[in-house]
Image (spheres, grey):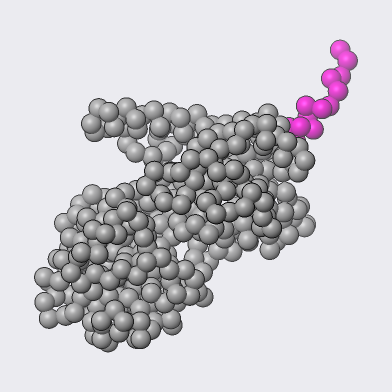
Amino acid sequence: MNTPVLHICLVSDTFAPHINGVACTLSNLSEGLRLRGHHVRVVRPRQPGEQASSHNPGVRLWRDWPLPGYTGLQRGGVSLQMLARHWRRQRPDVIYIATQGPLGLNALRTARRLGIAVVSGLHTHVAHPSGQYGMGVMARLLSLYLRWFHRRAVLTLVPSLSQQRWLERRGFERLGHLACGVDAQLFTPARRSQALRERWGLGHDDIAVLHVGRLAPEKNLGLLQGCFEALQRALPQRNVRLILVGDGPLRGMLQLIPGAVLCGVQRGEELAEHYASSDLFLFPSLTETFGNVVLEAMASGLAVVAYDQATAAQHIGHGHNGALAMPGDAAAFIDAACWLLQDSETLRRVRLNARQHASHQGWTKIIDQFEAHLLSASLSAHQRQATSMQPVPPL
């Protein structure tokens, strides 16, 4: 039986060409759905320098206010009336809301008013409501709001099984798992470039320790620096360099680290070349949900050191295709990195296993799952509408 063609609207504060896990995932999902014949539109904020109208699919909203600490990124704001007019003209079969901010809230309220099915995505790291009193209160309020928000969706998709279990224990309902994928033809060890390594000041037997991501406090980059310095002490006979791909408010501090090479933001084949030309990938974040960079590094044949949570916990078997530490245990994280580099045969085996695993994590299966979730939500909404329109039989 042929799959029905859907009119789908994605609502998000971030989308390509932004560089982050949510934007990357939504871009791959939307492109995959279009290739299958579905009509996909995107509602997102209009960013600085963009025109109010564009030839790209979707709706570019008027700029609202900047997100603190995220230069060039705006949080969307649009009235219920604007969204209602737009969706009455081009009514979607289903709406996927990937933000719980003002844009997402208005999209949710409008969709419910118009009777359009909503699938939501919870891509936010929900903090545990403990610790200092003020932060505990804020975390509790955020958790209550998110639970209220997502209960109004047909289904809420989360990027890791561990996050799904954590949320279920805290009263979140109708949760589904939608992992991220990786393009193993783009991210491959075959892109290793000795010329690039030489620009970093490295020879064949030297070590490039890589980190890819936003250079911001929430990424736990203090541990990144501490781990790199420990590797230098543990391998005094080797030339070890810290390669940083990305940009953010901590760039000025990180460029002062002796042996660090800051490469700025990289995209596409250039990014893939940076991965493949490195040897070890450090992922010290405790707040990631998607963690796309973990799979990109593994597909590029890198040994990854990460905390045992979220995406890393799903894809890394400790000692087999990477190394894991208990969340928050900085000493164990550093020990894992040192262990990987102490024996060249161990490192070679782990890198081969990482590539083999990631090569089976393509986007096709992920898009299959996403398409099925959207079809189910749309069908349920149509059935409810048909039932409500049936005449009441006489007594």
Quadrant holding the N terminus: bottom right
Q: In this view, does 116 lie to the left or right of 218?
A: right
Image location (x, y in percent) of residue 309: 34, 52
Who is closer to the viewer here, 264 or 25? 264
Any magenta on residue 286? no
Q: From the viewer's perspective, is residue 393 above or below residue 30?
A: above
Q: In this view, does 292 lie to the left or right of 84?
A: left
Image location (x, y in percent) of residue 231: 17, 69
**Looking at the image, can residue 205 be seen?**
yes
Quadrant holding the C terminus: top right
Which residue is found at the position 54% from the left and 58% from the top? 16
Q: From the viewer's perspective, is residue 131 above or below residue 96?
A: above
Which residue is found at the position 38% from the left and 84% from the top? 193
Magenta stretch, residue numbers: 382-395
Image location (x, y in percent) of residue 346: 25, 76
Who is closer to the viewer here, 227 or 387? 227
Q: From the viewer's perspective, is residue 179 above or below residue 84?
A: below
Any magenta on residue 388? yes
Which residue is found at the position 50% from the left and 62% from the top? 181
Image location (x, y in percent) of residue 98: 54, 45
Which residue is found at the position 24% from the left and 78% from the top? 207
Q: In this view, does 48 lie to the left or right of 130?
A: right
Residue at the right extreme, as displayed: 394
Q: How many marks?
A: 0
